[in-house]
Image (cartoon, rainbow, N blue to C red):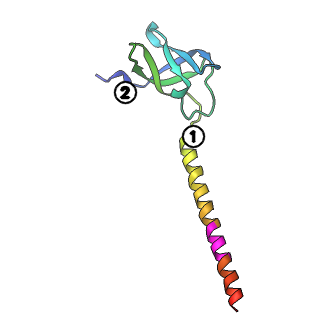
Amino acid sequence: MASKENTVLTGKLKRWNEAKGFGFISTEHGQRDIFIHISDLKGMSRRPLVGDMIHYQVKVQNDGKNRAINASIEGVERIQDSRDSRSNKKASKSNKNRALLFIALATVAIIVAIALF
């Protein structure tokens, strides 16, 4: 039998507190609502809205309550993870720095060459 954490479930977002970034998903079979935090909706192109269908996995927390993890909003596009974007910005800045250094060294070499003639 598959564990809860590996099974992808779907439920409707029943409540959402935008100010605090959490809400509850109603489940099938009348089970207790599942807590969801905005951090478990990584990469969504928009914030969740009450009524959205949420695909999620379940994690049992230390207090025995269930929590939605690895969640996504049905029909909403995923965007690049901000951590990836930060590393891409760092790489881009590093490449710019190398290009500027090359230009500076080339300029110095040209000035020295002109001064020698």
In the rendered image, residue 25, in percent from the top left (x then y), is placed at: 52, 16
The mark that comes first in sequence, 2 or 1, is: 2
Please say whether residue 104 is one of the residues in the magenta stretch: yes
Q: What crowding class fits label 1: few (fewer than 14 Cα within 10 Å), some (14-19), or many (20 or more)?
A: few
The residue sitting at the top extreme is 30
Residue, disc 1: 82
Secondary-structure class at tag 2: helix
How far is the residue under mark 2 from the one under mark 1?
25 Å
Residue occupying image coordinates x 63% and y 74%: 105
Residue 114 is marked as none
Q: Which is more toward the observer, 116 or 32?
A: 116
The prevailing secondary structure element of the residues shown in magenta is: helix
Magenta-highlighted residues: 101-107
In the rendered image, residue 115, in percent from the top left (x then y), is placed at: 71, 87
Q: Nearer the viewer, mark 2 or mark 1?
A: 1
Residue, disc 2: 6
Secondary-structure class at tag 1: helix
Q: Quadrant of residue 23 in the image?
A: top right
Q: Which is more toward the observer, 40 or 113?
A: 113
Q: Which is more toward the observer, 100 or 10?
A: 100
Is 92 displayed left or right of 107 in the figure?
Answer: left
Residue occupying image coordinates x 50% and y 16%: 35
Residue type, mark 2 in image: Asn
Residue occupying image coordinates x 37% and y 27%: 6
Q: Quadrant of residue 84 in the image?
A: top right
